[in-house]
Amino acid sequence: MNAPTSADPTGAASAGGANDQSLRVQRQVMWNRLISVVEEGAQVLLKTAFGAVTREAGDLSVGVYDSQGRMVAQAVTGTPGHVNTMAMAVGHFLERFALDTLHSEDVLVTNDPWMGTGHLFDFVVVSPVFHRGRAVALIASTCHVIDIGGRGFTAEAQSVYEEGLWVPHLKLFDAGRVNQTLLALIERNVREPLQTRGDLMSLVSCNKAAALRLQGLMTEFALSDLQSLSDYIIDTSARAMHEAIAALPDGQWRHSMRIDGNGEPVDLVATLCIEGDRLWVDYAGSSALSRSGINSPKCYTDAYTVYGIKCVIAPDIPNNAGSLSAMQVRAEVGSIVHPLPPAPVTARHVIGQMLPDLMFGCLQQPCGAQVSAEGAGSIWVLAMSGEGASGRYQTMSLGIGGMGGRPGKDGLSCTAFPSGVGSIPVEITEASSPLLFHRRQYLPGSGGDGQFRGGLGSEIEIAHRDGGSFSISAATFDRRIFPARGRYGGGDGQVGSCRISNGTVILDKGVHEVPAGCSLLLQLPGGGGYGDPAARAPQALAQDLAEGLHHKPGAK
């Protein structure tokens, strides 16, 4: 059996006869339509979201789930951290709200970090889909809101209670009636009530649009429910994933990575185990819980672990409950990759977004030269605030480093891997605040040398347009001490840096004041190189020099 792909996701082979062929074609068409259903929801969210990180960067996810809460399809638009955590999150809703007790106009919500997407800033909204008078499926979506109260976007909190408002599983809409009490409570506890409420309503609109399209699909194909189609897609995807695992040699492979942490380094240690068609990852040996908000809840650890594995061994198999179920993740309770409440978790992607590169290190051993060098990993969330002519403002931009060099290709520059989010245009940030970007450009020479060089990081300078002061949170700034490592003889990427134009160097993950008249100066880390630098094609090196992407020898 061929592994399912987006072109033929069911992977069905013709068993003979016109009926089998017709069923195969019909299933393929319905699969493609399911993708369209949730992608339309994602586009509605992109167009209606209030927060720039959702609207401009695509920091979101949308999925369709069967009556058992299993993810059947995901939107193309979205991040692995959101998608794969949300794959598990819907089950938690159904444990509290049985599907047959829901009304067609109910909408459920939570931002629980351990039962959602890993920190309080992400709301998950779930809506039942009714067809012929009964609930047959669910649509779920999530996005990052700019503020959730508490200490704001910082790693300085000592517990989740300091980090903001923790909303349990509740009804945002009850039989079509908005929960005004919940909204009033949220709005009173956040600094940006309009944006937060607007994003919640955008998630509701997203689910509504996807639900309407799903109902149309079911009517068109005369489906009474999704169960048969869901079973087929999930079971076939699971079989294909197990076959991909079985094609690898049995064994155990261990890899480790040291990253900056906050005040003391963090060690991430993983052992990848393969036995027949079974695969699991064990994080024994990783650092203990951090006192800073960089801890990664298990749901987020799982999400990026399985994403990294799937990128290497089965990129074409659909990402759904079936393919995800073939991989298991183990982690010690109380470690930095499996904290329990009330551990602080705001900047959980400092850990989580490094895990795919850790998986690449494990898979390098059984898979040979099929994995990329390490990249920048964690995006640098530029959460900035201060006073302007029109009062207090709070805004967010993104700093993005380079990817590692790849088999046969250079690493991509200023590209967010593994999150996949885009950057926020400087014009958006400048229009919503008195901040001014003096520059945002490639950082020459920041990618590690190699036969295929690492991707470049960026260089950013930000100041207050009117000469005032402003604050910046360094909660997610990592790889300022320990660089992205090269692979197969490639050089390490350049470490990042954060400083103020008055000479102050920022090393921790706290909130820092940029004094009036000063600029914030950022250099984002580059990706590691792949392969022996001596083997780099002369024309490729000449092109780098001609385009100003690499320092000349001795210029570093």
Image (cartoon, rainbow, N blue to C red):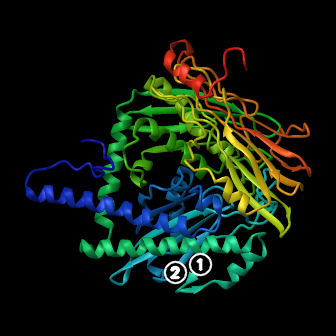
Report, in whole angstroms, how far the alpha carbon at label 2 lies from the one at label 1.
7 Å
- Classify the position of the N terminus by image quarter: top left
- Classify the position of the C terminus by image quarter: top right
Q: Position of residue 296 (x, y in %)?
A: 66, 48
- Under mark 2, the amino acid is Asp
Looking at the image, tell me whether mark 2 or mark 1 is earlier in sequence order: 2
- Kindly check if marks 2 and 1 are in contact, taking CB atoms under 8 A apart as contact: yes
Q: Quadrant of residue 274?
A: top left
Image position of 453 (left or right of 407): right
Q: Nearer the viewer, residue 209 or 285?
A: 209
Q: Residue at x 91, y 49 (%)?
A: 517
Of the numbered discs in the image, which one, if any, rests on residue 395? none
Image position of 426 (left or right of 236): right
Of the numbered discs in the image, which one, if any, rests on residue 106? 2
Q: Residue at x 86, y 67 (%)?
A: 389
Secondary structure of the residue carrying tag 2 is loop
Within 10 Å of the Cα at label 2, are there few (<14), some (14-19), or many (20+) other Cα atoms? some
Report whether residue 254 is seen.
yes
| Residue position marked by numbered label 1 in the rendering | 171
Q: Nearer the viewer, residue 49 or 14?
A: 49
Q: Nearer the viewer, residue 503 or 225?
A: 503
